[in-house]
Every structure is written in structure tokens, then in C-alpha cells.
Amino acid sequence: MNFNGCCDLGPHRTGRVSVDGGLHLPQRFANDYIEIDEHGNGYTGDVARNENWFGYLDPVHAVADGVVVSTRNNMPENTPPIEPLIENFTPDTDRGNSVVMRLRNGRYVLYGHLHTGSVRVKPGQRVRAGQVLGRMGNTGASGAPHLHLDISDSPHALEGNGLPFVYDRFRNVGSVTNLDEWMESGLDARVSAVSHEKRRGEYPLQASVLDFPR
């Protein structure tokens, strides 16, 4: 599920940052992905154990060919569901363990909140689409295991402007109708289901429940 994306006026869409006298919208098209089961649950058992969250330690794959620009691999895992204060982080560490890749035409893709020690690539390495970069974790400014993905015109997390993007293909499984309640209270997500609509060359909106072909 894309629980923090475009185009509602959420933290990503409205997060303006001033750097060196310039005003940027670095995450306006960023997405946060968390895995839920068929009942809308994000975890089972003790909420305070990362391993009980669906998707934790799942492999994170490159979305396109590119060259690795930077990585971070040593930040500790957080204890869910409490997100650490943003004041505890710098612009370089709030995404936790991460991989930044340079794509074509001056674009950069950032994968954030990866599991401690799981990053498999290094700066300067050429990567092919689908290659495993690391594993989903709960590091940096994160309250639960999820993947932060954004594309911008800068390799630095908060110093550029977010750019729109699309996926080659995915299936739209449904849309979460109680996203605000789910975010605030941890209630199970209520999914308004559709018949696994196939989408090509599209961008998934906030609250979309997605299934990517393997």
C-alpha cells in the first residue's frame, strides 16, 4: 500500500525545504510503501517487533538501470510503532539506511529506511533493473518497516525537487478508505477492492493497494 504519496496534501507533497537560499519540494512525488495482508493488517502479534510486520526484510529491487551514487548501511533499526523525533536526524540520515542511484537525464532515485547491514551495492557500481539492492527495514525517521521511494533532480535527499515518474506495469488491487484513521490509530486498513486492474505507464496514487508482477 502507498500510504504517503501524491496527490493529497500530505507530508511528502507539502514538505518545502530551504537550502542555500533556494526553496525546494524534494519529495512531492515520493511514495512510502508498506505491506498489508488480505484483511488490511500491517502486522501480526506484538506490534513492537519489527519481524512481525509484513514485508520486513523483503528484498528491495532497483526500479531501473543506473549507477549507485551513495549508500548508508549502519543505522540501527527502530522499535515500532513509535517514529523517532525528526530532530534526531540530519538531512543525510533521516532516510535511514539507503541507496541513491543516478538514472538517465539527470534523475536520481532514492530507496530509504533499509534494514541495517542489508545494502548489497556500493558507490560507482552499475545496477540493472530488478537487481536486489538491500532489504526493507525500519531505520531513520521511520515508525514501522516500509520502503521510501522518490525520484528527484538531486542526489541529496532534501536539496532538489521531486520529479514525477511512472511504473511500466502493476496491478491496482484496491484503495484504502480509512487511511487517516489507519495512520493515527493503527486500525486495520479497509480496502475498497477492484478486480486487480492492470495498469501500464502509470503512477500509483496515495492509498492505492498495489501488486507488482514478479
Image: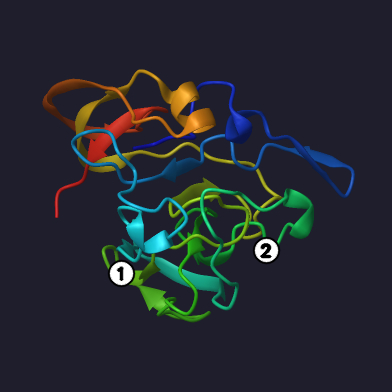
Q: Nearer the viewer, mark 1 or mark 2?
A: 2
Residue pictured at 45% horizontal, 69% vertical: 115
Considering the numbered disc 1 on the image, is that residue within a helix, a strand or a loop? loop
Q: Earlier in the sequence, mark 1 or mark 2?
A: 2
Instruction: Measuring from the top left, give residue 47's x and y in whole percent.
Output: 42, 50
Measuring from the top left, give residue 187's x and y in whole percent: 40, 30
Vertical order, 11 against 144 (above or below): above
| Residue 29 appears anywhere in the view | yes
User: Residue lying furthest front in this view?
Assistant: 46
Query: Which residue shows up at 31% across the image and 56% down it?
Result: 55
Label 1 sits on residue? 128
Question: Which label belongs to residue 93?
Answer: 2
- Callout count: 2
Q: Quick check: 90 left or right of 32?
A: right
Residue 201 location, x and y as percent?
27, 35
Q: How far apart are the alpha carbons under marks 1 and 2?
A: 26 Å
